C-alpha cells in the first residue's frame, strides 16, 4: 500500500522530495532512519518518504519512526508484488530488478538516500536524482571501498579514518564526503532497547559474530567446532549472532548444522529476523567479542572490552588496513588456542584498551552535535545547492 503526501504544488512550484530507500535487509534501516526523522523535523517544507522493497522492512521502519515520535512521513512499498515476492540468497527481493522496475518513480525525487551501494545502478537506469550513500557500518574490510562510490553525489563517513581511506584511494572527492559520525548510535540511544536475560546461569558472556562472506568468515572452517567447544563447557555463556546474511534469512529450525545446539542452556542463537540481532542488544550484553571481520566489533567497542579474532584463512594481517581492528585483541591462528585466548580475555585484561580507544576515536566522529542532525544538515545543503 502506498501512503504518500508528496507531489503537492505550492505557489506554482513542485514540493521538494527526498526518498530514504531500503532494498536490502532490515539491519540497514538502523543506519539512516534517524536521519530521515531529523530531516523531516528540521525541514517540514520538504517531503520525506521511506520506500522499501520488502513489507517487513517497511513495517520495521514504521515501528521505529513511531517510537521516535516523528512528524508526518510518507511510506511506499515498491512494486511489483510478484517481483517483491522473489527472494535472493540473502533473503531479500532481487535488488537490481526492483530498482529497474521503480526507476521512473524514484526519478521524481530530488534526492535518494540509501545505505547500500547497489543503488548506484540507478545512474545507468537514467535516474538524475542526487544520490546519497550513508554506509551501513564502519568496518575495515576492503569490500565497501570500491568504484561505485563515485556514482554518489554525497557519501557519508563515520569518522576521519573512513573518509581518508575513500579520498586517498580516489573513490570519493573530498567535497563529496561528509563526516557525520554514526547515526545508528543516535537511534539506539534514543530507543534504548531493553536488555533481556538470556541465560539462567550467570557466567561471562561471549558474543560469536562471524561474517557472511566465505572468503573472510571463520564460520565455514571453524564455526561448528566453536559451537561444540562452548556446548561442552560451563565457564561461559555464548550468544551466537552471526551477520544476518550468513544463513540467508532461514529460521533456526531449517539450519541442520545448528540443530545439535538448539535448546542448550548456555547457548543463545539468533541468526537474524529479530530486532535484537541488529539493534546492538548483543554487543551491549556480551563481555567478550569473538569474531573475524564484521564491523559490529566497533559497535561492541563503544566501551573497551576484550576481543578475540579468529584467523582460519592464515591471513597475513599486520599492516593491512582491512584488518585494523585485529589490533584490538588477541588473534587466534590455531583453533586449539581458543580456550587459552578466552581465558586471558575473561580475566578482564586491559592490554588492548588504549588501542581500542584510539581505534574507536579514529573510526567515529564524536562531536557534541548528534550524527543524525549532522547528516540531515548535509542532505539539506545538497538539496539547496
Image: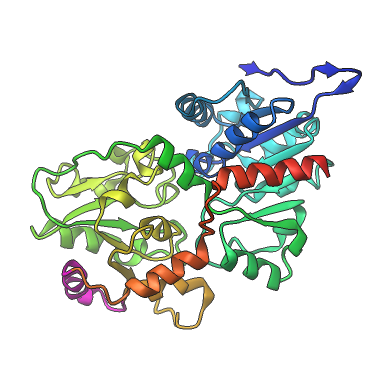
Residue at image point 44% right, 45% down: 248
Q: Horizontal and vertical percent for residue 174?
A: 74, 64
Instruction: Give the quadrant of residue 163.
Output: bottom right
Residue at image point 77% right, 32% down: 109
Extreme right residue here? Answer: 12
Q: Nearer the viewer, residue 356 or 283?
A: 356
Q: Nearer the viewer, residue 126 or 367?
A: 367
Magenta stretch: give its range: 331-347
Extreme front residue here? Answer: 368
Q: Is residue 71 above or below residue 147?
A: above
Which corner quadrant holds the N terminus? top right
| Any part of residue 140 in sight | no
Q: Is residue 283 left or right of residue 248?
A: left
Which corner quadrant holds the C terminus? top right
| Any part of residue 181 in sight | yes
Residue at image point 73% right, 28% down: 46
Q: Horizontal and vertical percent for residue 12?
A: 91, 18
Q: Main secondary structure of the magenta part?
A: helix
Residue at image point 71% right, 43% down: 379
Q: Horizontal and vertical percent for residue 133?
A: 66, 49
Q: Is residue 72 left or right of residue 6?
A: left
Q: Horizontal and vertical percent for residue 356?
A: 38, 69
Q: Is residue 193 magenta?
A: no
Q: Which colour style is shown? A: rainbow
Q: Is residue 332 magenta?
A: yes
Q: Nearer the viewer, residue 65 or 290?
A: 65
Q: Is residue 6 above or below residue 219?
A: above
Amino acid at each position: 500500500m502506498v501512503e504518500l503526501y508528496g507531489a503537492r504544488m505550492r505557489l506554482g512550484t513542485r514540493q521538494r522530495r527526498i526518498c530514504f530507500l531500503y532494498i536490502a535487509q532490515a539491519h540497514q534501516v538502523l543506519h539512516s532512519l534517524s536521519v530521515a526523522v531529523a530531516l523531516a523535523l528540521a525541514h517540514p517544507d520538504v517531503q520525506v518518504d521511506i520506500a522499501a522493497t520488502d513489507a517487513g522492512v517497511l513495517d520495521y521502519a514504521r515501528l521505529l519512526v513511531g517510537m521516535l515520535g516523528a512528524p508526518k512521513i510518507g511510506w511506499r512499498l515498491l512494486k511489483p508484488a510478484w517481483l517483491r515476492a522473489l527472494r535472493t540468497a540473502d533473503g531479500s527481493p532481487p535488488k537490481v530488478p526492483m530498482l529497474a522496475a521503480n526507476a521512473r518513480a524514484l526519478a521524481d525525487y530530488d534526492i535518494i538516500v540509501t545505505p547500500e551501494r547497489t543503488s548506484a545502478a540507478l545512474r545507468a537506469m537514467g535516474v538524475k536524482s542526487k544520490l546519497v550513500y550513508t554506509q551501513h557500518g564502519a568496518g575495515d574490510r576492503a569490500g565497501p571501498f570500491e568504484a561505485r562510490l563515485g556514482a554518489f553525489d554525497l557519501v557519508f563517513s563515520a569518522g576521519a579514518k573512513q573518509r581518508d581511506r575513500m579520498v586517498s584511494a580516489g573513490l570519493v572527492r573530498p567535497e563529496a564526503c561528509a563526516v557525520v559520525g554514526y547515526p545508528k548510535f543516535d537511534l539506539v540511544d534514543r530507543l534504548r532497547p531493553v536488555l533481556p536475560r538470556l541465560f539462567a546461569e550467570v557466567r561471562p558472556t561471549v558474543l560469536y559474530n562471524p561474517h557472511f562472506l566465505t572468503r573472510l568468515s571463520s564460520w565455514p572452517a571453524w564455526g561448528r567446532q566453536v559451537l561444540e567447544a562452548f556446548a561442552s563447557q560451563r565457564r561461559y555463556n555464548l550468544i551466537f549472532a552471526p551477520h544476518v546474511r550468513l544463513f540467508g534469512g532461514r529460521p533456526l529450525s531449517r539450519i541442520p548444522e545448528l540443530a545439535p545446539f538448539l535448546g542448550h542452556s548456555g547457548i543463545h542463537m539468533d541468526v537474524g529476523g529479530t530486532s535484537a540481532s541488529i539493534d546492538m542488544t548483543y554487543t551491549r550484553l556480551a563481555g567478550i567479542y569473538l569474531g573475524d571481520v564484521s564491523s559490529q566489533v566497533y559497535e561492541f567497542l563503544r566501551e573497551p572490552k576484550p576481543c578475540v579474532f579468529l584467523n582460519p584463512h592464515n591471513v597475513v594481517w599486520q599492516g593491512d588496513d582491512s584488518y585494523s581492528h585485529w589490533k584490538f585483541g588477541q588473534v587466534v591462528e590455531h583453533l586449539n588456542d581458543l580456550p587459552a585466548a578466552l581465558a586471558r580475555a575473561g580475566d578482564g585484561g586491559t592490554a588492548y584498551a588504549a588501542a581500542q580507544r584510539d581505534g574507536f576515536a579514529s573510526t567515529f566522529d564524536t562531536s557534541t552535535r548528534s550524527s543524525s542532525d549532522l547528516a540531515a544538515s548535509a542532505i539539506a545543503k545538497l538539496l539547496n545547492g
